[in-house]
Amino acid sequence: MSYRIYTKTGDKGETSLIGGSRVSKASDRLEAYGTADELNSFIGLLRASLEKSGQEERAEMLEIDGVLNRIQNKLFNLGGFLATDPLVAQTTESTEIAEEEVQILERMIDKWQEELEPVRGFILPGGDESIALCHVCRTVARRLERRMVVLFAADDSAGVKGEICLQYVNRMSDFLFILSKKIAKVRKKSLFLWEK
């Protein structure tokens, strides 16, 4: 028998968490890991847009792509952590985010910030497709953070693992903001500033 992608088990608005318990598709937990999946998809689109870079930009875009690849893999881990029944997560080795991942993002932010000119004012999304996609990813990361705060407030079983996951997503939105400026610099694009 061939493998089928559809199971029909979610036809009535419920799904299974890792561990087997059933929850509503409208639950805070599904909102959280669904948003992690959405962010991962947009980062994939951002990576695809970087392939359109010119030859003189290639080396820096490869470095950026490597960091984004790592983020996509860690977002998959985060999705797995969020999709795991909290009672199961307490008793098993889960794929949450390690504190080292927060530090990696911080190092990239610090490194790029030193290279970039300070900007006075609020930056509007735009400049080119990749820069605009950084801002889309940034705003989805902020939404993911809000969804996780709601989830963890309602279910305090996330503990230290949840705290590190929140730090990671918070730092990721900062990283994506700095990345938008980094790409603008590499591609010699002007930043769009808010005009009151």
Image: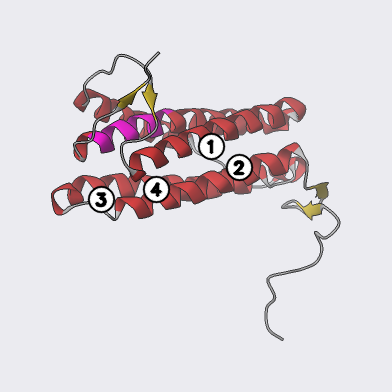
The residue under label 2 is: 35
In terms of sequence position, does the residue under pointer 4 or pointer 1 come before the other? 4
Task: Report, in whole angstroms, how far the alpha carbon at label 3 lies from the one at label 4.
Answer: 13 Å
Name the amino acid, label 4.
Leu
From the image, state whether disc 3 or disc 1 is nearer to you.
1
| Residue 56 place in picture, x, y as percent | 13, 49
Give the label, 3 or 4, closer to the camera: 4
The residue pinned by badge 4 equals: 46
Question: Is any atom of residue 95 visible in this view?
Answer: no
Q: Tell me the amino acid under the disc marked 3.
A: Leu
Distance between mark 2 and mark 4 Cα atoms: 16 Å
Which disc number belongs to residue 140?
A: 1
CA separation in Å, label 1 and label 2: 7 Å
Number of marks: 4
Q: How is the image coloured?
A: secondary structure
Q: Picture coordinates of residue 194 (x, y %)?
A: 38, 20
Q: Earlier in the sequence, mark 2 or mark 4?
A: 2
Relative to 196, residue 1 above or below: below
The amino acid type, in three-letter code, at marker 1 is: Val
- Report helix, strand or loop for mark 2: helix
Q: Residue at x 80, y 59 (%)?
A: 10
As measured in the structure, the alpha-carbon distance from the residue carrying label 4 to the one carrying label 1 is 13 Å
Q: Quadrant of the N terminus?
A: bottom right
Assess disc 4: are there few (<14), some (14-19) or many (≥20) residues with their C-alpha within 10 Å of its C-alpha: many
Q: Amino acid at mark 2?
A: Thr
Q: Is 93 left or right of 169, judged from the image as shown?
A: right
As for residue 71 lying within the magenta part, the answer is no
SS under mark 4: helix
Tell me, for residue 62, which label it has, or none: 3
- Taking the magenta stretch, the answer to whether it contains residue 181 is yes
